[in-house]
Amino acid sequence: QVQLLESGGGSVQTGGSLRLSCVASGYTGSVNCMGWFRQAPGEERAALAVLYTGGESTYYFVSVKDRFIISQDNAKNTLYLQMDGLKPEDTGMYYCAAQYACVFGGGMWYPASYATWGQGTQVTVSS
């Protein structure tokens, strides 16, 4: 089993930047895909970006494409989400999640496709 721990959230103004980190521990070799999700108050958890850990292919949801970058540092067992050009609608709790068997295509955007989740880190963007 893998454990995930996010950090890096905070409060910024519109146009600001943050870099989120997600440190994985445990049997990390079993993880093949990882994703970042956001959950705004009163809304469902929504996928933002997905990374295939084996080949480093990346996928972005349209709302964050060209503003967010997902990446990994294998030596540190850490997944990152660089967020630039933040907007008030980016406010929410951000979670990283892991898949042991990657689900490609439309399924990669569904929370139910992910087996392990971190506890989340809060991002607040003010106007």
Image (spheres, rainbow, N blue to C red):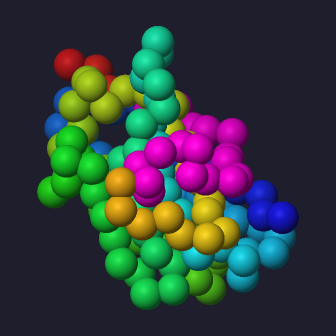
Q: Quadrant of the N terminus?
A: bottom right
Residue at 28% over, 57% down: 60
- Would residue 111 be seen by someone viewing this image from the given angle? yes
- Would residue 84 be seen by someone viewing this image from the given angle? no
Give the answer, above or below, for where 80 lies relative to 91. below
Residue 44 on image: x %, y %: 47, 25
Give the answer, above or below, for where 48 lies relative to 89. below
Q: Looking at the image, how many numbered discs can be counted on the residues?
A: 0
Q: Quadrant of the C terminus?
A: top left
Residue 66 on image: x %, y %: 15, 57
In this rendering, position of residue 37 left or right of residue 115: left
Give the answer, above or below, for where 100 lies relative to 8. below
User: In the orientation shown, which residue stands out farthest toward the top?
Assistant: 42
What are the residue bounds of the magenta stretch?
A: 107-124
Residue 12 on image: x %, y %: 33, 32
| Residue 90 inside the magenta-drawn segment | no
Residue at 81% over, 75% down: 27
> Which of these two is toward me, 117 or 87?
117
